[in-house]
Amino acid sequence: MAAPWPPPPSHSAPRSKMAAPWPVPLLALLAAAAALSEAGGLCRGGSGTGTGSRPGDTESCRVSLSLEHSFELDDAPRFRRRGTLALSSGPEPALALAQKPLGDEERARLREVAARDGLYRVRVPRKPLGPGEEGDTEFVTSFVRACALLESHLSDQLTLHLDVAGNVVALGVVAAPGTCRGTEVEDVDLELFNTSVALRQPQPAATPETAAFIRHLEQEQAQRARNPQEQKSFFAKYWMYIIPIVLFLMMSGAPDAGGAQGGGTGGGGGAGVR
């Protein structure tokens, strides 16, 4: 029996097409984008908070640094918490300080260290601390005479210095007025710190305006190309005036020189006859 024409459609299941594998660079880019999206609001590895009200706004970063102080007479200071420095980076960086009152034990320690002309020390970590990083972090430390801080009624100024990466590189503390005269200070004047804070960041150096200089050179070259007469020397431009003047001077000076020579010879002959 002849087979029917056209042949009936086959009922076998269609083979599924395997998707082409993605290129490795594209996968790497997607992985990096995913990591950035997960860390979107974090600052410095999760130690701060990123803020931005709308897309396109400049994102600012707010981090916290623990401020610690020590009242010790020996070279083994034992730091305790004094307050928290809040650093806001961005187009207009700012620094704020929140600190707790001085306790009775700390006031007694400050008086003792001041009476023996000891040092009052402060320190902050170089970068915000993450979970479990308290033991292996680096600190920057500064100090002032304890008697100066005592007689200033806990009035001091803290200056925080940052590098271009935002890490703390130095800390300065100054007591105002900073004198040690043995003045008696009551406990009521040693309860709260009167602290002013300042932030210092490196300023970018002035860069030469290379683009403007190159543009100026290009304009000069174009001007010379349009006016090739300017490239000639003085003699090349005015030779038709210089040569006639030189020839005239040479021709006008030749007869005078011949006459002077003939007159001298005649005079000499007359003297010989005489």
Image (spheres, rainbow, N blue to C red):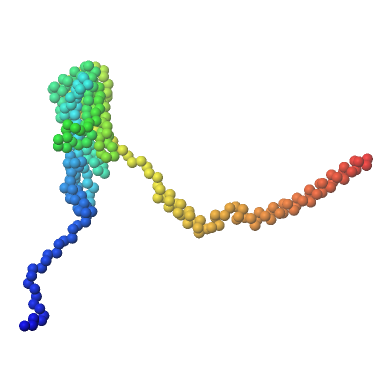
On the image, the x and y values in percent for residue 269 come to 89, 43
Q: Is residue 247 visible?
A: yes
Quadrant containing the C terminus in the rendered view: top right
**Quarter of image, res 74:** top left
- Is residue 267 toward the left or the right of residue 158 in the image? right
Q: Position of residue 62 (x, y in %)?
A: 20, 41
**Considering only vertical position in the picture, is 27 above or below 142?**
below
Question: Going 72% across and 52% down the picture, which residue do you hit?
Answer: 249
Residue 229, position in %: x, y? 55, 57
Q: Residue at x 47, y 57 (%)?
A: 222
Q: Residue at x 22, y 21 (%)?
A: 75
Tell me what residue is drawn at x 8 percent, y 73 percent: 10
Q: Is residue 54 visible?
A: no
Q: Nearer the viewer, residue 50 or 4?
A: 4
Q: Quadrant of residue 7?
A: bottom left
**Quarter of the figure with the N terminus:** bottom left
